[in-house]
Image (spheres, helix red, strand yellow):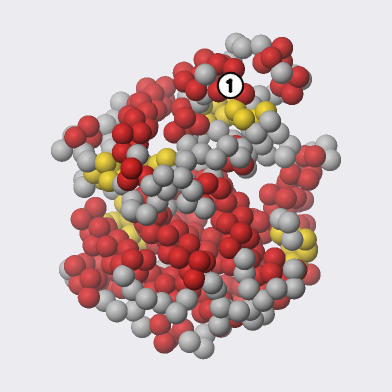
Amino acid sequence: MTEEKKPLQIPEGISYNCQGCGRCCSGFAVGLTLKDYDKVKDVDWASKHPQLAGIELFAHREIEFADGLSPFPIYTKAHPDGACPFLVDNLCFIHGTLGESEKPTLCQMFPYTFVGTPKGVFAGVSHSSMASVRNLGRPLLEQREMLEGMLELNKQLQAQLKEEAGKTDDNVALSSMNLAPGIPISWDEYFLIEERMLSLTRQEPFADTCRMWLSAGEILAEAIRLKSTAQDLSLISQFKPNLSIWQDKVPTSFENLMFALLCFRGLTWPLIRRRRIQNNQKPASRLDILRCVLGVLITKKMEFPNCGSVSIEKSTEKLDALSPEIDHFMRQYLYLKLFGKTYFGSAMGGLSVVAGFNHLVATALMSLIYGKACAMKKGEREIAIADLYESVLLLDKQMVLVSQTSGQMALMYDQGFASPRVFSRLLARMERSLS
């Protein structure tokens, strides 16, 4: 079946319409094709708005793009606070001045995602928008015509990048994948695993969300066992995870260290980097980063957005159980990532299924840690759904940065997150602290 004839698969229960808040236009640079850049490069932006005068609007990566080390040849150059330089009064100035068609293609498509498979093209939405995090707007199932238009735009973008990079191969994105490093699987095999994991989000009751994530990790571990022993992966449909093995497990020192570093990278370092820029300091050197990391490891404290200094050890203190609203949100989060298939493969820097899943688990854990820190700061006993929304928005943007890493860095991530159970003890501890 050709790409043009593949059916468009749309997730159930997922809604989105832009709410005009402008928050999605910050936190990461936007990639432009050379064709996108040609539309805006010669405009005298300084004469059109004083906010655009005297600043660099674009970062050039043409050399890295030609060498295959950058997904795009040009990027927008963000303000010190992380906002897009063209964000004026929370609105896109390119859109308002030149029209929607002149915006970078990525911006026109945002936050919709599309991944091609033998079963069709699977649509989804990125959680880098607060509207998509909160599931606001019309159901995507009622917006098929719009999504088909966005899919066509996505095809044009991929063709343009291929042409500009001088590529002549006809490989389809995600045509091959690994279950774990060194364990290749076919799409048919992947769908067997995904169907079993999707059942966790749609059919199976859990006392709390941590048990859902633990079960998903056990399913992947079983899939690796079946694949490594040359057994039929269809057996995964009957597999029932045994979570009692994690009942009394505590994280190892290495796991605590790894998770602390992930929290630093995802929640603390973006704050430090932004503050350095706002104070007109030079970009942080490796020594500066090392000093910050050592400070966190020695004091066991780090700064979270809108929360101040947070004790890592306090994150283990007990709070009330998660609300049904949060449980539903976490199920929807995992469902959408699985359905959209944006957590592994070429959509995620080439990561294996297991490594990509572990990034999702880390995001879930960090969101809960952030929610607990906010609750304790306010003297409350229950995590607020608004704080969870905030953390998922921030951390999903960090996942976008991971997806843009070079091949060598992606390989390091893949090897570092190769075990499906790398966060299981942390999940078990989190469950005990929220009961």
Q: Is residue 383 left or right of residue 202?
A: right
Q: Position of residue 155 (x, y in %)?
A: 33, 30
Residue at image point 33% right, 66% down: 202
- 426 or 431, nearer to the observer: 431
- 311 or 51, nearer to the observer: 51
Q: Is residue 269 left or right of residue 95?
A: right
Picture layout, residue 21 above or below residue 201: above
Dividing the picture into quarters, in which one does residue 328 lie? bottom left
Q: Position of residue 302 (x, y in %)?
A: 74, 63
Residue at image point 75% right, 73% down: 379
Secondary structure under badge 1?
helix
Q: Quadrant of the N terminus?
A: top left
Q: Quadrant of the C terminus?
A: bottom right
Q: How many marks?
A: 1
Mark 1, Cα crowd under 10 Å, few <14 / some 14-19 / many 20+, is few
Q: Is residue 369 visible?
A: no
Q: Which residue was labeled with disc 1?
A: 96
Residue at image point 23% right, 35% down: 3
